[in-house]
Amino acid sequence: MISPNEYPRLFKRAYSPAELIADAVVHGVALVAGLIAFAVLFVRLALLGQTNDVLATSVYAAGFFLLFGFSCAYNLTPPSQVKVLLRRLDQAAIFLMISGTYTVILSRAADDVVIWTLVVIVWIASLAGATFTILHPGKFDRVAVGLYLALGWAGVAILWPLSARLPAHSLMLIFAGGLFYSLGVPFHLWNRLKFQNAIWHGFVTVAAACQYAGIAEAVGR
C-alpha cells in the first residue's frame, strides 16, 4: 500500500475545523439537493414512459452521486491509507461524471452517428483516465485536470448538430455549467487560499446544478 509520506500531495495542507465544516456543508447541500432533484426527474420520466431517457439518466445520476460521495468522503477523511484509496476513487469519479453527463445529453440524438462517436470517444478516454488515476495515484495531477477540461469542452465540436436536438435554453445552462467548472479550477489549485476547498466545491455544485437544470429541461420531451 502507498503511505501518506510517499505522496504528500494527496493530503495538501491541514485544513482548519472551520474549513472542514464549510466543505462538509457544501457537499451536504449538493447530495441532499441531488437526491431530491433526481427523484423528481425519475418520477417525471417514469410517467412519460421514456425508457431510453431513464437509462441514460441513471448513468448520469450514478456519476453525480459517485462524484460528490467520494469527494465528500475523501476531503473529510484525515490522512490515512483509507484517504489514499478515497482519493483514487474521487479522481476516477470525476471522469465518470463527465461521461455520464455526455450520455444523458446525447441520448437525445440516438440516430446521429457523429454525436454518438463523440460519446464513445469520451467514454474510452474517461475509462482510461479513471483506470490510470486508480493505478497511479498522485502522478500527473495537473495533466488529469487538463484532461477533465478537454473532455468537458469536447462537446463544443458537435454544438451545431446538438443545437438542433436540444432546446436553446438547455444548451445555455449546460454551457454555463461547464463555465463554472472551468472558473473553479484555479481555486482547486490554489491550495494556500483559506477555504479553498469549500470554494472549489461550491463552483462544482453550482456547475452541476446548472447542467442538471439544462438536462432536466431537455429529457422527457
Image (tube, grey):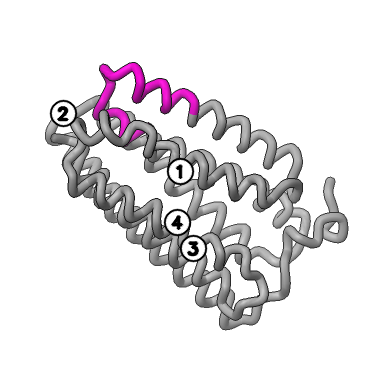
Report the label total.
4
- The kind of residue tagged 1 is Gly
Q: Are marks 3 and 4 in contact (CB under 8 Å)?
A: yes
Please give the residue where the numbered disc 2 appears in the rendered image: 49
Residue, x 40% and y 51% (percent of image)?
Answer: 178
Q: What is the quadrant of residue 7 in the picture?
A: bottom right
- The kind of residue tagged 3 is Gly
Percent x, y for residue 185? 53, 60
Percent x, y for residue 53? 25, 31
Q: Nearer the viewer, mark 2 or mark 1?
A: 1
- The kind of residue tagged 4 is Tyr
> What range of the chain is rendered magenta?
103-121
- The kind of residue tagged 2 is Gly
Q: Are marks 1 and 4 in contact (CB under 8 Å)?
A: yes
Query: Going from the N terminus, do you reach mark 1 or mark 3 first?
Result: 1
| CA distance separating discs 1 and 3 | 14 Å
Query: Going from the N terminus, do you reach mark 1 or mark 4 first?
Result: 1
Of helix, strand and loop, which one carries label 2? loop
Percent x, y for residue 79? 75, 64
Please give the residue where the numbered disc 4 appears in the rendered image: 181
Q: Are marks 1 and 3 in contact (CB under 8 Å)?
A: no
Q: Is residue 91 above or below residue 109?
A: below
Please give the residue where the numbered disc 1 appears in the rendered image: 152
Q: Is residue 10 left or right of residue 30?
A: right
How packed is label 2: few (under 14 Cα within 10 Å), some, or many (20 or more)?
few
Residue, x 80% and y 61% (percent of image)?
Answer: 8
Foreground residue among 109 and 114: 114
